[in-house]
Image (tube, rainbow, N blue to C red):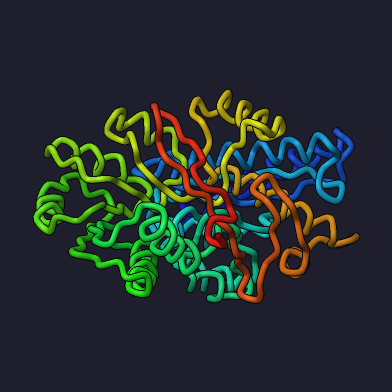
Amino acid sequence: MKKLCALLCVLMMLSMALFANGNKEEEAAKAEGFKGIIKIGVLGPLTGTNAEYGVGFKIGTQMAADRINAAGGANGYKLILVPKDSKGDPKESSDLTRQFCDDSDIMAIIGDFTSGCSMANAPIVDDAKIVQLSPTASNPKYAGMSDYCFSIMGRQDGEAPFFAKYIISKYMGVKKIGLIYINSDWGVSAADNFRKAANEAGVEIVTEVNYVQDEKDFSSLITKLKAANPEALIIMDQGAVAQVINQVRAMGWDVPLTTLGPGTSEQLIGLTGANSEGLILSTPFFFDPQVPELMAWKTEFNDKAKFNPTVHPACAFDCVNLIAQAINSCGDTVTRQGIRDNLARNEYTGITGPIKFNKDGDITRAYLICQVENGQYVVKKGFDYSAE
């Protein structure tokens, strides 16, 4: 009984401390001229294999919040972001999502990075009736799982077929491909959609292998792939692509390499060096040197992150602006439901392009073909390539 009473006292003191801190934030915001504060939860893998992308989320979202607050806030409210480390683990992500849902100050959630984490959270946000807007989840099943689930990356039933039909078959002229992919919700979806499109394009997958999250040694899988003698190898993942590339080259295999997942990640080039020379990939967005606004954004991000951005933090940046636009449309009373309803019907043009949600809550993207040349990414074909 004494232990229980002590525990209750600790919890009560913690709650009072959190309440007092919340009041201080509210009072400070009002002193700055805001109506008050609105908090947004941010979920991403700040540690682990995909930490580059989670850190990118954290920095990209804060860049957006800083700009919005400097311009007077969202509907007069100061936006405060609450970032949490999901570690790329669905269970961890779900536990953090429940915490956000139980906190009445959290009005929306941005994240998570992977489709697996976002899908694990879908029934939780559905019960709580709070938006989960993922910058990057691309499993076609994700957004349709709940009226409160949204994503702006585009879907794997769009990108994977583009990869098979236009990058592998048309651009590279390859008819026999080897496939290695991560065995996750995202990886399985990407592989499934790629297989179907490859078959339609007359591309034979001569062999395929998969691996689990945090795998380190790919030698036996690479040996199997090499024995099938494919004309090129496609890697479907985000975090382990660099390790796979390095181990392929360490085994003396000079097969042409392609990858679906990491976008134009500068860290990928940094981790692979000359091993990634010639690497071909798809991306829905590229920092065009001819657009000063994009270059300024890239420079600001790099100054804060100490690495160059991919499409992923750019999408995270756009997500905050989408939520802010939805808050602006709420009028005098900002609610979780109001944010959801306005988000679903509003249109927005961000740094990653035009965003208009379909009935499922995700969007259709067009894709560029990029290649690593002399240690940097260059655009080889534009958004209109599939229409040629």
Indicate the position of residue 18 as horizontal and vertical percent values.
63, 45
Give the side of residue 243 with respect to residue 74, left or right: left
Relative vertical location of residue 202 with respect to residue 41 in this rendering, above or below: below
Please tell me which residue is depicted at 74% across the width and 38% down the height of the picture.
Answer: 24
| Residue 247, x across and y down, in percent | 18, 40
Q: In the figure, residue 359 lies in which quadrant?
A: bottom right
How many tags in the picture?
A: 0
Is residue 347 visible in the rendered image? The answer is: yes
Left or right: 369 in relation to 24: left
Q: Is residue 379 above or below residue 119?
A: above
The residue sitting at 35% across, 45% down in the picture is 239
Q: Is residue 367 above or below residue 158?
A: above
Tell which of 304 and 372 is nearer to you. 372
Seen at 57% across and 42% down, the residue is: 286
Q: Looking at the rendering, in which quadrant would you find the N terminus?
A: bottom left
Quadrant where the C terminus is found in the figure: bottom right
Q: Is residue 91 visible?
A: no
99 or 224, nearer to the observer: 224
Is 91 left, or right, of 41 in this rendering? Answer: left
Identify the residue at image location x=64%, y=38%: 62
To which quarter of the image does residue 117 belong? bottom left
Residue 354: x, y in percent?
A: 70, 55
- Tell me where residue 307 appears, x and y as whole percent: 48, 28
